[in-house]
Each structure stands twice: as structure tokens, then as C-alpha cells.
Image (spheres, grey):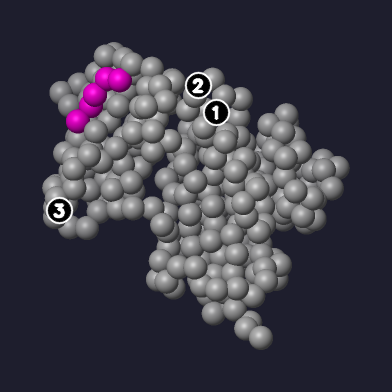
Amino acid sequence: MSSFKSGFVSIVGRPNVGKSTLLNSIVGQKVSIVSDKPSTTRTQVRGILTEKRGQIVFVDTPGIHKPKSLLGQRLNDAANQAIEDVDIVIVLTDASQEVGKGDSFVLARAPKNAIVVVNKCDLVPREKILAQLSALSKFDKSSYFPVSAKTGDGVNELVDELFNRLSPGPMYYPPETLTDISDADWVAELVREQLLTLTREELPHSIACKVTEWEWPRIRCEIYVERSSQKAIVIGKGGLILKEVGSKVREQLPPGAFLELFVKVNPHWQSKAHSLERLGY
């Protein structure tokens, strides 16, 4: 009987609890963009961990929230689907915040055998971690783990638990594969990540990015906003914001990459089905 185990594990939770940071920590490389803005992740992003003992395909999901647009509804749909279509569900919470309605909403939808993970334990004293674990215990899930995705504390123990639970199975991806995201989609995500870092307030939610041409080393990426005033912010005075975005993204690409960025206005794209489909949402 084969000792090689495999399976699919989804990471779900409300926005900004650190799902993408946890995925990157487990895989050991950046496979999902990270920012301090809610709803950074907009699609199911897969990260693959392959060891001698097996292979785990992790599914990073959008934060489950109260939607205000068609985009928001589709993000929730993607997260809810990830709860149903996997072997194990990890529900991630934030140790630095009280257990609230958002956490309760997600936990109520998670299966009884879900693993509850309390993240950001490096930010709070031990007493607060214990208090949150106690508050979460009323949801009666199978196990609870305190971790810090940022420092890595507790992450290995969580991975051990996942392998212990999985059954023998095949290798779904070649051992060197870390993610199934395409190169073009990854560049678009890197551009959006930098814009999330450099812009404020409502603007991050109004930004979408898509690579429309790829003839290496030339890459054309279009940035969509909803209003002309937003376009001016994204470009920046004298084009400074756009130049900085391009420079930061190129640092993460192979040498010689020539990245062209274009900003376009698409009013109310978050509520247009055809716009969302073109953008892959």
C-alpha cells in the first residue's frame, strides 16, 4: 500500500485574516499576492506543497464578506465553492481581533471536521490567544491551531496535522510545481499588488488588471478603473505612480522583461457581468 498521501485543502475566512500569507509560508514561496487591503485575493489561487510523504494542493480563497457588487458576490461564490470541493477546510481567524460576526458566518458554513487556525499570534499576548481559542471552541470543530504565518511559528505543526489526515493518493502536479497560476495572470496580480500598496481608500476595490499581450520580453498589462479621477491617481503626478509600479514588478520578473502599463476607464466594471468574465472573475 502506497504511503504517499495527497489531497486538496482550502483556506477560508473573512477578509484580511492572512490567508495568502499562510499559503505563501506553507509553500515556501510567494504564490499569492499580499496586502493590508480587504479582498486582495479575488480568485481561487492554488499553491502546491510536495514532500516525500505526499502532496497537498492548497486553495487560497477570497475573503467571505457582505457583497456590495456583482464582483463581491462572485468572490463569495468562489470561497463557498472551495468549502465544498476539498478534502480538508482550514478556517483562518485573526488573533488580534475579537471573534465577530464575519468569523461566525464562515464557521457556520464550514464542516464539523474543519481545522480552525488562529493566525497573527505574534501580535498578541498568550492570554489573548487562549481567550480566542476558548471563544472559538463553541463552534465545535475538530481541531484548533495557533500560528503566525508571518514568523512561521506553528505552521509546521499544522502541515503535519494535514498530512496525518489525508489518505493515500496520486501526485496531482509535478513535484517542482508551486502554483497553477499562469505567467500572464501572475504578472497582472503583481501589478495589482503594487497598486494596492500605493493607493488608498476606495480606489483599491476599483482596480483590476489584465495582461493583454505577451511577446517575451514585451508584456502589455492594462489597468482598469471606474472613473477618470481614479485614472489620474493611478498614473500619478508626472506618471510617478505608474513608473514605481512598473519598477517594483520588474524586480520580481526574469531579467530583460519589458513591461508596458496602460490605464483605462471602465465605469462600474465591478457590476458588469461581461467585464467580470473578461477579467476572469
How far, Cα to Cα, is label 1 from label 3? Answer: 35 Å
Judge whether 80 appears above or below 66 on screen.
below
Q: Residue pushed farthest front?
A: 274
Judge whether 68 appears above or below 15 on screen.
above
Q: Earlier in the sequence, mark 1 or mark 3?
A: 1
Residue 272 in which image quadrant: top left
- The residue depicted at 57 percent of the width and 36 percent of the height is 77
Judge whether 186 appears above or below 66 on screen.
below
Label 2 close to label 1 by CB (< 8 Å): yes
Disc ID at residue 69: 2
For the residue labelled by badge 1, is the local secondary structure a helix, a strand or a loop?
Answer: helix
Residue 86: percent from left, percent from top: 62, 55
Label 1 close to label 3 by CB (< 8 Å): no
Disc ID at residue 73: 1
Residue under pointer 3: 216
Magenta residues, as a range?
Answer: 262-266
How far, Cα to Cα, is label 3 from label 2? Answer: 36 Å
Amino acid at the residue labelled 1: Gln
